[in-house]
Amino acid sequence: MKPRSGASQTEAGRSKRHSGSNSTSGSAGDKRSGADHSNGPDQVDAINQLFAEFELAYHNQYHKAYGDPDRLVMAKKYWLECLADFHPEQLVTAARRLVKSQDFLPTISAVIRACEESYGLFGLPSERDAYTEACRAPAPKAAYGWSHPAVYQAGKATDWFFLATEAEDKVFPVFAYYYRQLCQRVIRGEDLQDPMPPALEKDPSQPLTFAEREQRLARLRAALDI
């Protein structure tokens, strides 16, 4: 990331760049990929709103931490870079959720956790709900009515046997890792495909025809060399 120069700025910057000798390229806002967010806040706007929420909710703590304008600019750029993988709506939602639930100025890790809990904005179940669904889904897995393809893909990547036989404290971190990666792909606009249901087998209760019985018998004789 090449941050914009100007220590006196109190904004993290704007995603729309204007040509000119004083502009720079390669900001964290430009690193976003996937869905078009032109109808809502971009990541830079979201970071500015996040800090505005924190200032209103934690006034004394906020000004003690970010009272110096130069320090505020550096903090916003740093937060922008650390939170670049999250959708702007996740950041705004996370900020509002945190100011309602925490007595102290939140950290970056607290924002990340809150963002991961806002998957519902994109039709995704929480990590815990996704894990429970993956553990309880009956076989064949591809034929199950998954709440979202990301849950199936995360279970498949984790390995169904591992998911079913090992203790939760060993399995859940692995599942959560794959699920987070898939959720970020969905949030960026990728359309994950539903699993392909297995082909239906012929009804075993239906008797074979005479020709089918003869074919099976011939294959059996050939296999046994008789």
Image (cartoon, grey):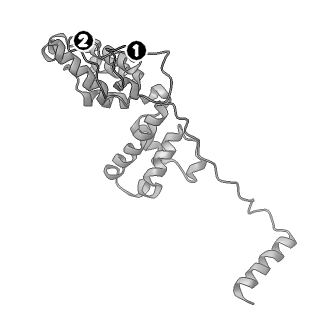
Relative to 160, say whether 61 is above or below: above
Q: Is residue 70 left or right of residue 154?
A: left
**Label annotation for residue 9:** 2
| Relative depth, front residue between 49 and 5 | 5
Q: Is residue 136 left or right of residue 217?
A: left
At which x and y percent is residue 105?
20, 20
Q: Secondary structure at mark 1?
A: loop
Q: CA distance from mark 1 to mark 2?
A: 19 Å
Relative to 179, say whether 8 is above or below: above
For badge 1, the amino acid type reads Ser
Q: Quadrant of residue 91?
A: top left
For badge 2, the amino acid type reads Gln
Which residue does the image show at 29% across and 17% down from the upper left?
12
Residue designated by label 1? 19
Q: Is the residue marked by circle 1 packed among few (<14), some (14-19), or many (20+) residues within 10 Å? A: few
Furthest residue in direction front, as rendered: 21
At which x and y percent is residue 173?
34, 46
| Relative depth, front residue between 198 and 213 | 198
At which x and y percent is residue 99?
27, 17
* Res 62 visible: no
Looking at the rendered image, the quarter that the N terminus falls into is top left
